[in-house]
Image: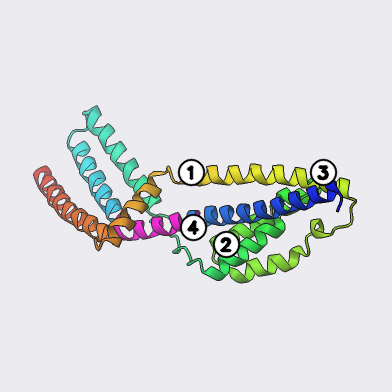
Amino acid sequence: MLPEEQELNRLESEQNELEEQVASVELSLETLKTELSQFNYRYNQSVGRLYVELDELGAQFALVQAGQHPDDVEAQFRAQAAQEQAQKSAEEAGIIESKPPPPEITPEIKQAFRQAAKLMHPDRATSDAERDRRNIMMAQVNRAYESGDLAAIEKLIVDFGQDPEAVKGDDTGARLIKAFRRIAQLRRRLAEAQQEIAEQQQHELYELMTTVLETEAMGGDPLIDLAQQLIEQISERKIQLEMLRQSAR
């Protein structure tokens, strides 16, 4: 075997390993996003709605106070701020625009995503037009993954067709150049995906999810405990609001 052929074999082997790594990291990234979405929904269903109710009571309390003191600029400002906070809480909890629960991501869906990512990844393109096509297809794959739609991912794989890059018809020199470029692209995408994961893990929601899951693994139920505390605060706030209304009569 000629030296350049040996080098080509080495590079193509490295390329295959990098393709596996990129597919795994991108699967981890999409899975993390989905897990965060699932936890966010669960959090809002268990305690987010209670925060909404508490903030709404706070807004009502501030409005009554503002009505009692129409010339008090600070009271009017507090009422406006309380209303805005109640609106924000409702939006974050999905109360204003009802959201369905995120789907479960099965091992079959993960496997299909890996297959699609390896086949369609934009970095495999050799022209701008082909890159655009791959970007569009991968965006559709990502949406199907987030929706838990295995059939849609499988259909996209069929629709995409066979990877033209898998056809080996070029001479050794051209394939060496292609392998060098592909490896550089894969290394760049691997670093980008790892950075995206690191950024996701710096979010407050990720820290909250991690804390809750760790506590639950030890037998605790932090969301139920927090919900009970909020229910008690809501009861107290209702009493305070009624007393304020009584004093205004």
Of label 4 and label 3, which has the lower sequence position?
Answer: 4
Dot in front, 4 or 1? 1
Tell me the mark number nearer the camera, choosing from 3 and 1: 3
Q: Which residue is mark 3?
A: 177
Which residue sits at x=23%, y=45%?
A: 58
Q: Amino acid at mark 2?
A: Tyr
Q: Nearer the viewer, mark 2 or mark 3?
A: 3
Mark 1–mark 2 CB contact (< 8 Å)? no
Q: Are marks 4 and 1 in contact (CB under 8 Å)?
A: no
| Residue annotated with mark 4 | 34
Q: What secondary structure characterizes most of the magenta part? A: helix
Which quarter of the figure has residue 137?
A: bottom right
Q: State which mark lies toward you, 1 or 2.
A: 1
Which secondary structure lies at badge 1?
Answer: helix
Residues packed near mark 4 inside 10 Å, few (<14), some (14 to 19) or many (20 plus): many
Per the image, label 4 sits on a secondary structure element best described as helix
Considering depth in this image, is 106 or 57 the residue closer to the camera?
Answer: 106
Residue closest to the eye, 16 or 195: 16
Label 4 and label 1: CA atoms lie apart by 15 Å
- Residue at point 32%, 46% (across, down): 86
The quarter in which the N terminus is drawn is bottom right
Q: Residues within 10 Å of mark 1 (few under 14, many from 20)?
A: few
- Which residue lies at the image location 66% right of the left edge and 54% below the top edge? 17
Task: Give the labeled residue for mark 1.
Answer: 198
- Name the quadrant of the C terminus: top left
Q: Which mark is residue 145?
A: 2
Residues at marks 2 and 4 touching, judged by CB atoms closer than 8 Å: yes
Part of the protein shown in magenta:
33-48
N-term mark: 2 or 4? 4
